[in-house]
């Protein structure tokens, strides 16, 4: 059994190759460790440098679309004959999905469409009038993988659909000493921080978080906002109680989270986010910090046990007053939730390969 995994190199403001980030890297990497002959082909929309390297048994090619490297690889004999994959998995967007379908048909392989987000909501998604590329790929895939339960229920369609949630590196995301984290980030030991780490588009609700903390401060509570992640360049927070650390490297994300007294997930309702499955939710939970989250399908559908544990400590979306209520309670009487079983990338990757029928080996008492 052999697999060709085609994915987007840069996504969610991360570099899948250099940061070994997310499902696009972790799924094929774990499959290769299980003895499955696996190649990872990364499509690079941002740089101009073609790369070939290996990570253990995983063979990796990164081809930029801004040069002839992508076309050269497609036309090469190496592409046609190297490995003769039994399965082609495509993940990243509709264009990579279309490429994966064409490659699978050309090589007479099974096509697996990995849907980690609602791709037809992406900014760069354009198709000819009257043609639904996203629906076409869903209809023509031999197997569909979904990161989000809500999206699978809406878009699964006919044929096999498998829930393959986003996972975490449990060695990277775990309980950390707050004092040590703050020293590492150069933050004062005695401050009280409510933190948010991740993309900061409007529907992520960073503005609601800042408004909620302003309400708490107006009421006499000395609390500050700690932010890290990618934000729109047009956004400029001038409040003195807001500290923005920039888009820190992925290796430093858990350190930033470890600096916080409360971790916030202030998501608003939107068709895109409601259908998503944010990696940061499991990352937050693994840090063993109390959460101040809004009640949205992204959280409730994908982490029902954690949502049930929080109960009335889930705030109304787009309501800074209710979010301020939750933050105040979590600062006064902290309540964390237990990390769900099966959130490690190793567990998720091995369950996915079993569902797809990739085979693999078992190492001792545990699956590789």
Image (cartoon, helix red, strand yellow):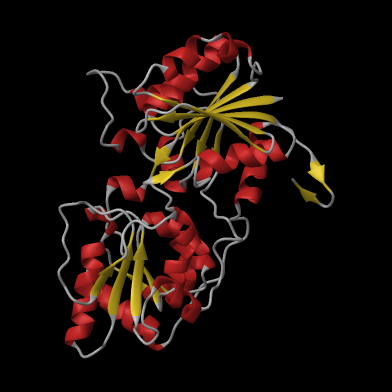
Any part of residue 291 in sight: yes
Residue sitting nearer the eye, 11 or 332? 11
Residue 208 position by quadrant? bottom left
The quarter of the rendered structure image containing the C terminus is top right
Percent coordinates x, y for residue 316 in the rendering: 28, 67
From the viewer's perspective, is residue 181 above or below residue 348?
below
The residue that appears at 57% across and 43% down in the rendered structure is 26
Q: Position of residue 154 (x, y in %)?
A: 40, 39
Point 57% across, 66% down: residue: 339
Check the image and name the residue furthest to the bottom. Answer: 220
Residue 78: quarter of image: top right
- Left or right of 348, for residue 290: left
Residue 328 spot, x, y in % from top left: 32, 83
Above or below, comparing residue 51 to residue 183 in the picture: above
Instruction: Please give the name of the residue rendered at 24% of the width and 18% of the height, measured from the top-left corner.
Output: 128
Is residue 63 placed above or below 311 in the rendered structure? Answer: above
- Quadrant of the rendered structure where residue 326 is? bottom left
Q: From the viewer's perspective, tell me whether residue 8 is left or right of residue 40.
A: left
Q: Is residue 191 left or right of residue 357?
A: left
Judged left or right of residue 88, residue 249 is left
Relative depth, front residue between 213 and 157: 213
User: Can residue 302 be seen?
Assistant: no
Determine whether 149 is above or below 62 in the image: below
Report the number of numbered marks.
Answer: 0
| Residue 1 percent location from the top left of the image | 72, 25
Task: Work out which residue is located at the far right of the displayed protein and give it.
Answer: 364
């Amino acid at each position: 059994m052999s697999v060709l995994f085609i994915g987007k190199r840069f996504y969610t403001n991360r570099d899948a190759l250099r940061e070994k980030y997310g499902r696009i890297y972790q799924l094929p990497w774990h499959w290769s460790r299980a003895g499955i002959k696996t190649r990872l082909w990364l499509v690079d929309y941002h740089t101009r440098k073609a790369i070939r390297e290996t990570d253990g048994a995983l063979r990796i090619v990164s081809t930029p679309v801004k040069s002839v490297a992508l076309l050269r690889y497609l036309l090469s004999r190496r592409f046609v004959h190297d490995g003769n994959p039994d399965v082609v998995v495509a993940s990243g967007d509709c264009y990579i999905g279309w490429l994966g379908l064409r490659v699978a048909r050309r090589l007479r392989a099974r096509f697996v469409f990995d849907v980690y987000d609602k791709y037809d909501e992406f900014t760069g998604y354009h198709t000819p009038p009257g043609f639904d590329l996203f629906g076409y790929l869903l209809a023509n895939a031999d197997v569909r993988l979904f990161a989000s339960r809500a999206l699978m229920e809406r878009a699964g369609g006919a044929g096999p659909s498998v829930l393959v949630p986003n996972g975490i590196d449990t060695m990277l995301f775990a309980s950390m000493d707050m004092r040590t984290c703050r020293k590492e980030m150069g933050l004062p030991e005695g401050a009280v921080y409510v933190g948010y780490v991740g993309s900061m588009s409007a529907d992520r609700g960073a503005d609601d978080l800042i408004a909620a903390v302003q309400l708490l401060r107006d009421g006499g509570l000395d609390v500050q906002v700690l932010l890290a992640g990618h934000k729109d360049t047009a956004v400029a927070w001038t409040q003195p109680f807001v500290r923005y650390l920039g888009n820190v490297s992925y290796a430093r994300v858990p350190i930033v989270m470890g600096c916080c007294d409360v971790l916030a997930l202030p998501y608003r309702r939107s068709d895109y986010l409601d259908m998503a499955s944010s990696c940061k939710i499991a990352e937050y939970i693994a840090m063993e910090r109390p959460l101040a989250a809004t009640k949205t399908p992204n959280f409730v559908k994908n982490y029902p046990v954690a949502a049930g544990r929080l109960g009335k400590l889930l705030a109304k979306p787009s309501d800074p007053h209710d979010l301020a209520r939750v933050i105040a309670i979590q600062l006064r009487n902290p309540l964390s939730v237990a990390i769900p079983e099966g959130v490690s990338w190793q567990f998720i990757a091995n369950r996915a390969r079993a569902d797809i029928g990739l085979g693999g080996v078992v190492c001792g008492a545990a699956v590789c």
